[in-house]
Image (tube, rainbow, N blue to C red):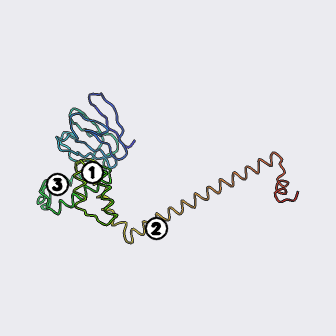
Amino acid sequence: MSGWLDVEDDAGVRRHPLTEGLTRLGGAGAQLTVPDVGGDQVHVWNDPPRAIFVGTGRPPRLNGAPLAEAALRPGDRLEWNGARFVYGGKPASEHEAELEELAGDEPSAAYVAAPVGRVLSLREERIWDRLVAGMFVELGLADRAAAKRWQGEVIAGGFDADACAREILARSGQAADDPRIEERSTRLLRDLLMAPLLKGAKGASRRARQAAQGGVAYIIANVIAFGVFALITLLGLLLLRIQEYDLNAFLDRLLGRS
């Protein structure tokens, strides 16, 4: 078991194993529901063990302090609207703990100069709309007719990124703060972060190792298949010998000598 939560709520006390990857606590769509929290959720990751509050309402409390994002250790207690969750499993690594301590330091001057909630420039809004519209389409949240029409425009060579983003966002009826969008943005950032490692000499070396591993696996699979076939053939010949079947006479008949 990769980890678990001991849950205490109106339904009683029980142990809930964490899903590999992400377990959601909170509102609609969560594996563990918490009453009267709307669409707010807490995302609990099992590796590395971490809890993140995703929402706009009153945050839960982790060990008595409001939760934003925190590494988890065995015995950590999360309280939210009368429900209590106690984490059990492996502790966060020392590296995770160091990151958490850094997150609690005073923000840099550059960060203070760009506070959360500031008004985006026109160019930033265009970039944001394009990214969110693209994630809507990828995740199947976009209006199908709008997405299909703009796919046709791409094929026909008449693509307009801003018009496409405006129509998809207007017709899809989804909020940009949907938890699925947040998760996809995390994976997108990770993919972009790792993209340089797949280019140049490092990327070529990585692809060569993968190709070599695939070739070795193919050879091993064929050797195993040939060995199984040979074993079956040998067992058949031994069975015929035990039954004193004249294999030479059979071969002669095939050759037309009898």
Q: Is residue 135 above or below residue 20?
A: below
Residue 151 in picture, x, y percent from top left? 33, 59
Q: Is residue 95 visible?
A: no
Residue 70: horizontal and vertical position, in percent? 24, 47
Q: CA distance from mark 1 to mark 3?
A: 28 Å
Q: Which callout, 2 or 3, points at the residue further toward the start of the chain? A: 3
**Residue denoted by label 3:** 105
Q: Earlier in the sequence, mark 1 or mark 3?
A: 3
Classed neighbour count for the residue bearing mark 1: other residues with Cα under 10 Å, few (<14), some (14–19), many (≥20): some
| SS for callout 2 | helix
For the image shown, how many numbered marks are present on the structure?
3
To which residue does mark 2 refer? 208
Q: Residue at x 42, y 69 (%)?
A: 204
Visible residue check, residue 219: yes
Figure quadrant of residue 30: top left
Instruction: Please tell me whether mark 1 or mark 3 is closer to you in this view.
Output: 1
Q: Earlier in the sequence, mark 1 or mark 2?
A: 1
218 left or right of 208 in image: right
The image's mark for residue 181 is 1
x 24%, y 58%: residue: 165
Query: Foreground mark, 2 or 3?
Result: 2
Tag 2: amino acid:
Ala
Which secondary structure lies at badge 1? helix
Position of 154 with respect to 204 (left or right) is left
Three-letter code, disc 1: Ile
Expressed as whole percent of the image width and height from the top left, the position of residue 115 reads: 12, 56
